[in-house]
Image (cartoon, rainbow, N blue to C red):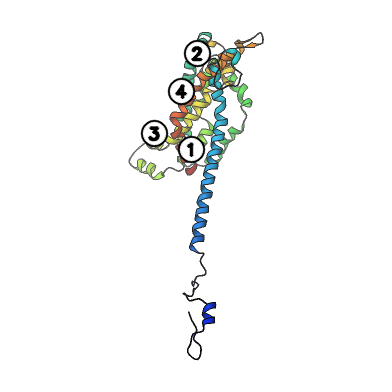
Amino acid sequence: MSRVLPHGSPDREYEAEHPSGPIPVAPAGGAEPPRNVSRAASRAARRGKKVRHVLAIVALSVLAVIFAYPFVWLISASFKPRGEVFDNKLIPDTFTWDNYVQVWQEAPLGLWLFNTLVVTVLAAVTVTISSAMVAWGFSYFRFRGRGALFGLVLATMMLPGAVTMIPTFLIWNSLGFVGTLVPLWGQNLFASAFYIFLLRQFMLGLPRDLFDAARVDGASQWAVFWRIGVPLTRPALAVVLVFEVQAVWTDLMRALIYLRDSTTFTVPRGLKSLVDAFGFGGEWHWEIIVTASVIATIPMIIVFFLAQKQIIHGIGAGGLKG
C-alpha cells in the first residue's frame, strides 16, 4: 500500500514505514486465535491424555502386584521344604513336590473338598432362587405397605451375626441337625436381604409391558416370573450365584459351630484342623498348611476366571438400572 503526494509522486518514506500487503480485518464475531496456537493446544491436550493414561497403567500395575504377591508367595512356599517356607524368596532354592503328596496322606482333603462342593452348590442355588422370588414380589406386585415391608427386610442387614448366632444354633439343635452339613446351607432357603435388594433394583428396570402382555395372553404369575422375569434377570442372578459361592466356600464360622466329625469337615474347617494338628512341640509344619491352602484356593480362582464377564455385566447393568 502506498500514498501519493499532492504533486503525484509516491511517498517513499510512508511506504518504508507501512509495507504493502493485505490489511488484516478482524472477524465480526470476535478475534480467533491463530491456527498454530490451536494446534499447539490440541497437541498439549493429547500429550496430557497420554501421560494420564500411562500413570493410570502404572498405578494399576502397582496395585495388581500388591494384591497378587501374597498368593504368589503362597504358591512358592508350597514347593519349599519346611526350613525354607519363610525365606521370602519367590523362586525356591529347593524345589519339591513332596508337600503335595504329603498333604493328601495327612488329611482327607478330597472328602473335605467334596463336602465343601456339596454345601456350596446347595447354598448358592437355594439362596439365588429364594432371593429372586422375594425380590420379584417386591418389584412386580403393588400392595399396601410394600415399602415398609421392604425396609424391614433391609433392616435385618443391620443386625450383627453374633446377635442371631445363639438363637439359630438352638433352632438347628432342636431339629437335630447339629453335626451335619444342613445348617451350612439350610438357612439359605429363606433368602438373603442383601441379594433381595440387589435383585429387586435390577428387576425394577425391566419393561413391565412384557409382563402385562403375558398376563393378557393367559400366563400365570409363576409362568411370568419363571419364563420372562428370570431370563431377563440372568446377569444379576449370575452375580448373586458367584458371590454366594465365594462366601460359602470360605465360610469358617458356621463350620466351627456346627461340625464335629472330621468326615463332615469343609475345607476351611479342615484347614483349621491342620493348623491345630501340626502345631506340636513348638514346631509348625507350615509347608503342609500352605500347600492345603493353595489347593483350597484354586477352585475359587477358576470360578472367578470363568464368570468374570457375567460379574462385570451384572454389576454394571444393576448399577444402571438401579
Who's the residue at 57% across and 31% down the image? Answer: 66
Hey, what amino acid is under mark 4? Answer: Val
Circles 3 and 4, Cβ within 8 Å, touching? The answer is no
Instruction: Answer few, some or many: residues within 10 Å of disc 3's Cα (few below 14, many 20 plus, some between 14 and 19).
Output: few
What is the number of the mark on residue 271? none
Q: Secondary structure at mark 4?
A: helix
Q: Nearer the viewer, residue 306 or 284?
A: 284
Considering only order in the chain, which callout, 4 or 3, is on the residue closer to the N terminus? 4
Viewer-side label of 4, 1? 1
Q: Disc 1 versus disc 2: distance between alpha carbons?
A: 40 Å
What is the number of the mark on residue 97? 2
Q: Which residue in the rendered view is the most extreme toward the bottom?
A: 7
Viewer-side label of 3, 2? 2
Instruction: Answer few, some or many: residues within 10 Å of disc 4's Cα (few below 14, many 20 plus, some between 14 and 19).
Output: some
Instruction: Answer few, some or many: residues within 10 Å of disc 2's Cα (few below 14, many 20 plus, some between 14 and 19).
Output: few
Q: Nearer the viewer, residue 238 or 286?
A: 286
Spot occupied by residue 136 in the image (x, y as percentages of width and height): 46, 36
Spot occupied by residue 254 in the image (x, y as percentages of width and height): 57, 20
Hey, what amino acid is under mark 2? Answer: Trp
Considering only order in the chain, which callout, 1 or 3, is on the residue closer to the N terminus? 3
Viewer-side label of 3, 1? 1
Which residue carries the number 1 mark?
315
Which residue carries the number 3 mark?
226
Considering only order in the chain, which callout, 2 or 3, is on the residue closer to the N terminus? 2
What is the number of the mark on residue 121? 4
Q: Disc 2 versus disc 4: distance between alpha carbons?
A: 31 Å
